[in-house]
Amino acid sequence: MSAEAPVDEGELVLTERRGAVAVVTMNRPRYRNAQNARMTFALDAAFSAAAADDDVHVIVLAGAGDHFSAGHDIGTPGRDIHKDFARVATQYWPHEDKAGAEAMYVREAELYLGMCRRWRELPKPTIAMVQGACIAGGLMLAWVCDLIVAADDAFFADPVLRMGIPGVEYFAHPFVMSPRLAKEFLFTGERMSAERAERIGMINRVVPRARLVEETLAVADRIAAMPRFGVALAKKAINQAEDRMGMRDVMDATYALHHLAHAHNALTTEDHLAGQDAKSMAKGLK
Ligand code: ZN
């Protein structure tokens, strides 16, 4: 582990109110909004605040700059080595000083799977507003949202199989697309265009890049005008249906496989990511 000094990047998550809509924006555009622990906890705080705010009816999740999210931060100066985040954990003890499989298992249970599940269960409707890259960890952020509106330049990919890992921690793949397409998506790691993502039902609509904010807010405003409790019940009904279809159980089972892969990498390669970092992963992306 490096002993680099903490990097002050300012506010990593911004919240703006647009009428009854809270727009929560990931704000690391320089790093394509790569998700470090500090941003993750800040995102959690922003979602909690929006959920608690009586005047907010709909939450939009956005990414500043040209890209929605490059995924988990595995290579910027502000990645998790600094541990300068406000830790408000709800599931596990601190992972930072733990050894072996425990560190990764506990870390990702808290930061990725646990938080994603909590965000999916927010009582208010959420809309991901996606432009540019939505890669690996970025998929989880979009998939936890109830609706996804994408710009025509958006693309989706989960290339973590190149690390020997069977998909990102929030394993919604066979539920947001067909099992056969999920295999193609994982086995090849190739980009899926917004147009194809809409065709297969993974996202709700594709709009011109220049109209992304306007179109997303129009959808948000329409939902915000509906009875709030009714929307919350409808959301719960669909989420319950997904869970009855096995999504929660599949995610638990796959989380174990995911950590078998991390542990296998740690035992057989230089680290739990099979020696890959943001640079080497980017090289493989077409
Ligand atoms: Zn992982």
Image (cartoon, helix red, strand yellow):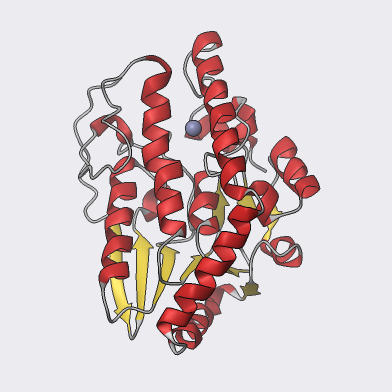
Asked if residue 189 lies left or right of residue 112, the reply is right
Residue at 27% across, 57% down: 45
Give the camera-side residue of 97 and 26.
97
Residue at 46% across, 72% down: 125
Residue at 70% across, 67% down: 198
Residue 41, image x and y in percent? 29, 48
Task: Find the residue positioned furthest to the bottom.
Answer: 225
Residue 252, image x and y in percent? 54, 38
Q: Looking at the image, can residue 217 be seen?
A: no
Locate residue 24: give its quadrant. Answer: bottom left
Give the camera-side residue of 29 and 61.
61
Task: Find the residue positioned furthest to the top.
Answer: 268
Residue 5, image x and y in percent? 19, 31
Q: Is residue 198 above or below residue 113?
A: below
Asked if residue 105 lies left or right of residue 180, the reply is left
Locate residue 55: give its quadrant. Answer: bottom left
